[in-house]
Each structure stands twice: as C-alpha cells, then as structure tokens.
Image: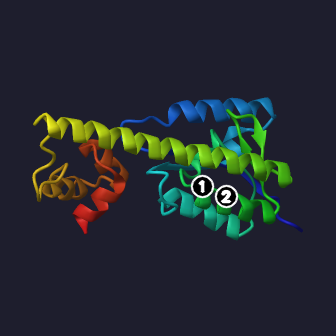
Amino acid sequence: MKKMKRIAVYIRVSTIGQNQAGQKREIAKWLSGNSIDPESVLWFFDKETGDTLTRPAFEKLQGAVFNGEVGTIVVWKLDRLSRKLQDGINTLCNWCEKGLRVVSVTQQLDFAGATGKLIASVLFAVAEMEQETRRERQKAGIDAAKANGVYLGRKPGTTKGKPARAMALREKGLTHDEIAVAMGVSRRTVIRYLG
C-alpha cells in the first residue's frame, strides 16, 4: 500500500525578537479554509537568517522531502524559504521537479508549473534586493555615525552574551533554543558558546 504524503509547513523568523505566532495563525487559517486539520500537518520552525540554507528545521524539512514523506509545502511568504535568489530558485525548482506542491499563503500563490517558477524567480529577486537595500542603509547609517563620532562599534573580543551563562543554563537542563531566547542571541551563537 502506497504511503500517503503529508503536508509540511515551514515557518522562519530571522531574530529572537520576532514571533512565529503571526505566521502560524495565517497558515492555520489557510489550512482550516482548505479543510486540513492543522494537527495532521508536519510543522518546521526556524529562528535563523534567510541568507543561508543551513538551518536546523529547514534541513529536517529537506530530509522529509528526500524520504518522500511530503507532498505539499506551505509557507507564509516565499522569502521565508530564502533571501537569496539562487538558493530560493534552486530549492523551489528541486521541489517542483519532485512533484511537490508549494503554496505561499499571504501571496495567494501556488508554485506548480512553469508560470509558478517564473513568479517565484521574481519574488526571490525582490527578497534579495530588499536584503541588500537593508544592508546598504545599515552601512550608510553606521558610516554617518562613525563620521560624527557617535558609533564606536563593539569592542574587539567582546560577545553579545556571556558564554559562562550559556553553560550554566545548559547545566539547568535548558535546550539550545531556550538558552538562545533567555540570552537574546541566536541558536547558532549558543552552539558556538557551548562548543
């Protein structure tokens, strides 16, 4: 008997301060509107940058795709997959070639077929442009602050948090994600501290 493929939801926020609840609520509304029980869906959550595909939950999603467990992937917005044009297009094309349905809830788009790929390429290009524009504005602001003697930057050798605190929290039984939230740093930083 052929195993039925499941629906997977991928949610990503970039920073610890951002909240996944808004994305989850919109996606749950879409699922309910399509008579899909949100409890029957595979949920994948990342608190990582979209500049890289090396993200824990994204890698688990890719594993589920590779194992043939997933037939549909639902995202809040396409840029949740990637902020890089090439990474986003390659991922989406690979999924579509495997016969997966990819849906962006807020953009009301289904990326099956050639038209879907064309639209996706435009959306990924816009996401990458937004990211680059944000970086340019940030750099311009820092350069202006430095010129006015206001911005001194982080002192060499300093860290956002204290590695010893991360170790103490781990000894109390907290997970990497819980330590990251408690310290206001990324999960990746916690892993580096606990090295």
The quadrant in which residue 156 appears is bottom left
Q: In the picture provided, is 84 more to the left or to the right than 91? A: left
* C-alpha span from label 2 to label 1: 6 Å
Say if mark 2 contacts mark 1, CB within 8 Å.
yes
Q: Choose between 108 and 40: the one closer to the eye.
A: 108
Q: Residue furthest front?
A: 147
**Callout 1, which amino acid?**
Leu
**Three-letter amino acid code at the position of disc 2:** Ile
Q: Which mark is residue 17?
A: none
Q: Quadrant of residue 136?
A: top left
Q: Is residue 59 visible?
A: yes
Residue picked out by circle 1 = 85
Q: Secondary structure at mark 2?
A: helix
Q: Nearer the viewer, residue 137 or 81?
A: 137
Mark 2 — residue? 89
Answer with left or right where residue 54 lies relative to residue 168. right
Percent across and percent down for residue 2 are 87, 67
33 vs 44: above or below: above
Above/below status of 7 relative to 55? above
Q: Position of residue 183 (x, y in %)?
A: 24, 45
Q: Give me the residue at 30% from left, 39% from top.
A: 140
Secondary structure at badge 1 equals helix
Q: Quadrant of the C terminus?
A: bottom left
